[in-house]
Image: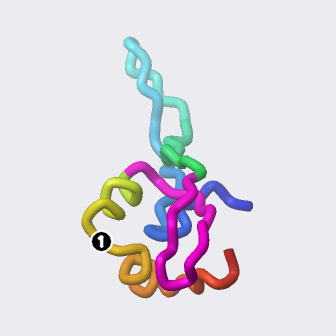
Amino acid sequence: MARKCQLTGKQANNAFAISHSHRRTKKLQEVNLQWKRIWWSEGNRWVRLRLSTKAIKTLEHKSLDKFAKEAGLDLNRF
């Protein structure tokens, strides 16, 4: 499975690590992903998703159904 948030679609970003002498080398900025069990009230069961911390914070304000519908995610698969 790719390191990607299942709700927001966030993934790694290419960047430069810049030294004190300003020598630039490529690096990867990974997304802060967490495995999270969330109660899905419509399906009446727990759903285990790999989410970014931003998505976890957003879930406190939005319902899981609404957020998954915006992402085009079918929760019956999880």
Q: Nearer the viewer, residue 46 or 16?
A: 46
**Picture residue at 39% right of the left edge, 59% below the top:** 55
Residue at the far left in the pictured view: 61
**Picture residue at 53% right of the left edge, 44% below the top:** 30
As helix, strand or loop, the secondary structure at mark 1 comes to loop
Measuring from the top left, give residue 59's x and y in whole percent. Answer: 35, 63
Measuring from the top left, give residue 3's x and y in whole percent. Answer: 63, 55
- Vertical side of 75 occupied by 20: above or below: above
In the picture, the quarter occupied by the C terminus is bottom right
Measuring from the top left, give residue 19's x and y in whole percent. Answer: 43, 18
**Picture residue at 51% right of the left edge, 66% below the top:** 39
Residue occupied by mark 1: 62
- Is residue 40 found left or right of 63 in the rendered image? right
Residue at the far top in the pictured view: 20
**Picture residue at 49% right of the left edge, 44% below the top:** 32
- Vertical side of 5 occupied by 26: above or below: above
Q: Nearer the viewer, residue 28 or 61?
A: 61
The colour mode here is rainbow
Q: Is residue 38 magenta?
A: yes
In the picture, the quarter occupied by the N terminus is bottom right
Q: Residues within 10 Å of mark 1 (few under 14, many from 20)?
A: few
Instruction: Tell me which amino acid carries mark 1.
Output: Lys
Q: Nearer the viewer, residue 48 or 44?
A: 44
Q: Nearer the viewer, residue 44 or 10?
A: 44
- What span is colored magenta in the figure? 36-53
Q: Is residue 26 magenta?
A: no
Residue at the far right in the pictured view: 1
Magenta stretch: helix, strand or loop mostly: strand
